[in-house]
């Protein structure tokens, strides 16, 4: 028996293809080769859902031939680092979204490119990204929702991408809370300041990745895109609300980090001022015996009190009492 062309002889999926399935009435009909996807997509009541992971050019061209995708869209899908956007090429939509994950304390970004047309949706993942297998499995268990077609799958993927921003923000928020609690106890070290700077930069990059999706969803709810039914518009507006929630959370965290940095500077300045006061106080106290000793250390024959019987004791008492008074005064003023 001849194996499907997207399955190797070993039974392992072809490189770059995560899944390639056809659905009808909300149920998976079959897993199909990519080279048969166009034929299945043309059947009434069927749609094809293909998931690709960092495909090579040959695989993208095979997909292009099946759905007659535009050359510019294929070129964008082959080369990541695109800004989130939605483009219409003939009867097909091309959508770019940025994904985010936290890896070793840093936010790493990937991209998802989506082709949507009559009877098909193709997702192309590049870089760090959570697999959409869980999205596929979840909605396969809800045939009534999956039966809505390819524009519903587009909503499900975009909603999944936006929802996955939240775990990243929650981990960053936990670290920000620790920084906020620690900043009033002691000034930040150089390592703390570097980490704070990296967090603020990652949050800015995350905002730049999530923010343009608001415009993407706005375009998807416009009447000039026939690929998206009007019944789906409320769902894309819901994704927009989620994105705005993400933006607000990012802005709040960046503001907290800015306040934490300012508070650390104030704490550091306060401690430096306290140290300077202590040093100045002790310098003033020590100046008394230094001055007296300096005066009596001058080599003159005729100096007062040199012949006094209790001159030495008197000078010592003067030094001690003056130093004690200064110590008491500085202590009372909070300098010591």
Image (tube, rainbow, N blue to C red):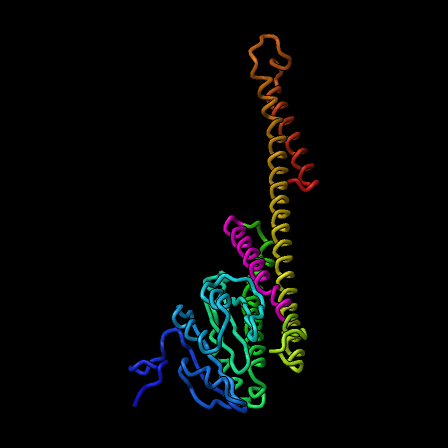
Asked which quadrant contains residue 277, the reply is: top right
From this view, report whether residue 194 is shown above or below residue 167.
above
Q: Is 193 one of the magenta-colored residues?
A: yes
Residue 68 percent across, percent down from the top left: 48, 75
Residue found at x 59% / y 86%: 148
Residue 280 percent across, percent down from the top left: 62, 34
From this view, report whether residue 65 is shown above or below residue 298.
below
Residue 93 percent across, percent down from the top left: 56, 73
Asked which quadrant contains residue 55, the reply is: bottom left
From this view, report whether residue 159 is shown above or below residue 29.
above
Viewer can see residue 101: no
Our reading of the magenta stretch's main secondary structure is helix
Location of the N terminus by quadrant is: bottom left
Q: What's the magenta region?
A: 189-217
Viewer can see residue 265: yes
Q: Classify residue 254 as left or right of residue 14.
A: right
Q: Classify residue 43 as left or right of residue 240.
A: left
Location of the C terminus by quadrant is: top right
């Amino acid at each position: 028996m001849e194996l499907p062309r997207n399955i190797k002889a070993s039974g392992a999926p072809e490189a770059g293809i995560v899944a390639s399935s056809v659905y009808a009435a909300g149920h998976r009909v079959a897993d199909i080769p990519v080279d048969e996807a166009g034929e299945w997509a043309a059947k009434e009541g069927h749609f094809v859902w293909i998931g690709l992971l960092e495909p090579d050019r040959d695989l993208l061209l095979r997909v292009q031939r099946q759905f007659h995708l535009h050359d510019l869209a294929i070129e964008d899908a082959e080369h990541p680092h695109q800004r989130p956007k939605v483009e219409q090429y003939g009867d097909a939509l091309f959508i770019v979204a940025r994904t985010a994950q936290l890896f070793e304390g840093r936010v790493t970004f990937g991209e998802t490119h989506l082709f949507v047309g009559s009877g098909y949706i193709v997702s192309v993942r590049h870089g760090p990204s959570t697999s959409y297998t869980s999205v596929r499995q979840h909605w396969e268990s809800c045939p009534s929702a999956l039966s809505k077609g390819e524009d519903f799958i587009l909503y499900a993927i975009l909603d999944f991408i936006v929802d996955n921003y939240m775990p990243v923000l929650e981990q960053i928020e936990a670290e920000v809370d620790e920084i906020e609690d620690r900043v009033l106890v002691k000034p930040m070290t150089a390592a703390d300041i570097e980490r704070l700077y990296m967090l603020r930069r990652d949050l800015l990059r995350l905002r730049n990745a999530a923010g343009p999706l608001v415009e993407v969803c706005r375009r998807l709810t416009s009447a000039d895109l026939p690929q998206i039914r009007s019944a789906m518009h409320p769902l894309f507006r819901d994704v927009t609300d989620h994105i705005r929630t993400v933006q607000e959370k990012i802005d709040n965290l960046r503001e907290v980090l800015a306040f934490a940095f300012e508070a650390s500077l104030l704490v550091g300045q306060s401690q430096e001022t306290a140290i300077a006061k202590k040093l100045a106080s002790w310098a003033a106290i020590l100046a008394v015996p230094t001055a007296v000793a300096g005066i009596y250390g001058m080599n003159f024959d005729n100096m007062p009190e040199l012949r006094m019987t209790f001159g030495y004791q008197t000078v010592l008492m003067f030094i001690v009492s003056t130093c004690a008074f200064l110590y008491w005064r500085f202590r009372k003023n909070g300098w010591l």
